[in-house]
Image (spheres, grey):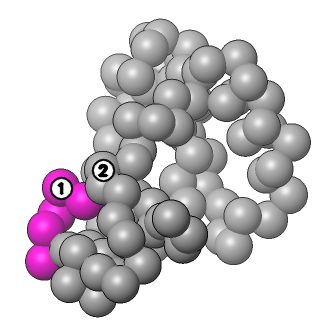
Amino acid sequence: MKNGGTALLVALFGKPVTTNAFDQVVREITIKGTIAYRNIFPEVIQLIHTGRMPVEKLVTARIELENIVEDGFEALLNNPTQVKILVKIAK
């Protein structure tokens, strides 16, 4: 993350997460948590618009609808490198 960046946590973790507070302060990093995307749309839209949130880097796969179980759900459950899988609904 760049200095002055913002991390928005929209997931729950099964175990406690540790952070380097010194690094966070020195680099002026902001960490925010949210649940169910409550009231974050204007801020997220602005982050995407300004290029500060490179959403394309989050997309780890694009799959066809007929492959959603194997290439979608199972991939998310079994492959920790998967982040966001987009499903093509129409051809």
Numbered disc 2: secondary structure = strand
* Residue 63, horizontal then vertical, whole percent: 34, 65
Q: Which residues are magenta?
A: 78-82
Residue located 36% across and 57% down the image = 62
Can residue 73 be seen in the rendering of this structure?
A: no
Q: Does residue 62 show up magenta in the picture? A: no
Numbered disc 1: secondary structure = loop
Badge 2 is on which residue? 60
Circle 2: is it few (<14), some (14-19), or many (20+) Cα within 10 Å?
few
Q: Are marks 1 and 2 in contact (CB under 8 Å)?
A: yes
**Quadrant of the rendered structure where residue 6 is?**
top right
* Residue 81, horizontal then vertical, whole percent: 18, 55
Instruction: Out of 23 and 9, give the one closest to the viewer.
Output: 9
Is residue 66 found left or right of 6 in the rendered image? left
Looking at the image, which residue sits at the far bottom? 69
Circle 1: is it few (<14), some (14-19), or many (20+) Cα within 10 Å?
few
Q: Amino acid at mark 1?
A: Thr
Q: Amino acid at mark 2?
A: Thr
**Quadrant of the rendered structure where residue 83 is?**
bottom left
Instruction: Out of 73 and 65, give the one closest to the viewer.
Output: 65
**Going from the N terminus, do you reach mark 1 or mark 2 first?**
2
Residue located 33% across and 42% down the image = 19
What is the chief secondary structure element of the magenta stretch?
Answer: loop
Looking at the rendered image, the disc whose residue lies closer to the viewer, 1 or 2, is 2
Instruction: Out of 47 and 75, give the one closest to the viewer.
Output: 75
Looking at the image, which residue sits at the far front? 91
Instruction: Out of 39 and 18, give the one closest to the viewer.
Output: 39
Is residue 21 found left or right of 78 in the rendered image? right
Image quadrant where one finds the N terminus: top left
Can residue 35 be seen in the rendering of this structure?
A: yes
Above or below: residue 48 compared with residue 66: above
Badge 1 is on which residue? 81
